[in-house]
Image: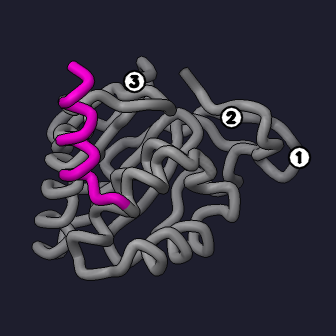
């Protein structure tokens, strides 16, 4: 499920640096000409975290790559736990001076959730993390209100609540 109809466009740059070493992007980007082009990652980053899969988009072999396909909608307890794990991997890599790209299809909601949680792990407040991502990536980033609610509630609490449904 994908949140639609909000008038957002693909972010123009293939990826954006949110804080030193932490980048956010998508598998597609739109050029100023309006042309939509694929974004292929090679060895530009030490680690790539993908929240959607697209064949032929990298990264190169030898680059640490985590993939957790999640919807741009309600997440299960298991998916929320996976997001927390990925944010922990990204946090450790950034603290160790490595470069990390977190990406999804468009580079705004799913990747925004993991990047925001990484920023929280790095000591930022929820409000500052979201504002920083929107300033550095796109004002359309994290327009999925459910993901903002997950961050505001706390992913571990959201995970416990989602587990009650199962």
Q: Earlier in the sequence, mark 3 or mark 2?
A: 2
Q: Quadrant of residue 45?
A: bottom left
Whole-percent x, y for residue 161 in the image: 25, 39
Q: Nearer the viewer, residue 32 or 67?
A: 67
Q: Residue at x 60, y 67 (%)?
A: 134
Left or right: 101 as drawn, with respect to 88: right
Boundaries of the magenta span: 153-166
Q: Secondary structure at mark 3?
A: loop
Residue under label 2, please give it: 37
The extreme front residue here reads 164
Mark 3–mark 1 CB contact (< 8 Å): no
With respect to residue 151, does 50 lie above or below? above
Residue under label 3, please give it: 53
The image quadrant where one finds the C terminus is top left
Residue under label 1, please give it: 33
| Tally of marks | 3
- Marks 3 and 2, how far apart in space? 16 Å
């Amino acid at each position: 499920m994908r949140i639609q109809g909000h008038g957002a466009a693909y972010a123009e740059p293939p990826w954006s640096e949110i804080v030193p070493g932490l980048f956010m992007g998508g598998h597609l980007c739109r050029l100023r000409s309006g042309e939509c082009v694929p974004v292929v990652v090679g060895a530009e980053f030490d680690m790539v975290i993908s929240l959607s899969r697209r064949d032929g988009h990298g990264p190169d072999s030898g680059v640490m790559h985590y993939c957790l396909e999640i919807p741009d909608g309600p997440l299960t307890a298991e998916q929320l736990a996976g997001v927390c794990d990925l944010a922990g991997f990204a946090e450790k890599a950034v603290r160790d001076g490595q470069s990390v790209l977190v990406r999804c299809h468009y580079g705004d909601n799913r990747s925004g959730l993991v990047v925001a949680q990484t920023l929280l792990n790095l000591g930022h407040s929820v409000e500052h993390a979201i504002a920083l991502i929107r300033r550095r990536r796109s004002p359309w980033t994290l327009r999925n209100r459910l993901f903002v609610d997950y961050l505001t509630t706390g992913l571990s609490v959201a995970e416990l609540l989602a587990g009650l449904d199962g």
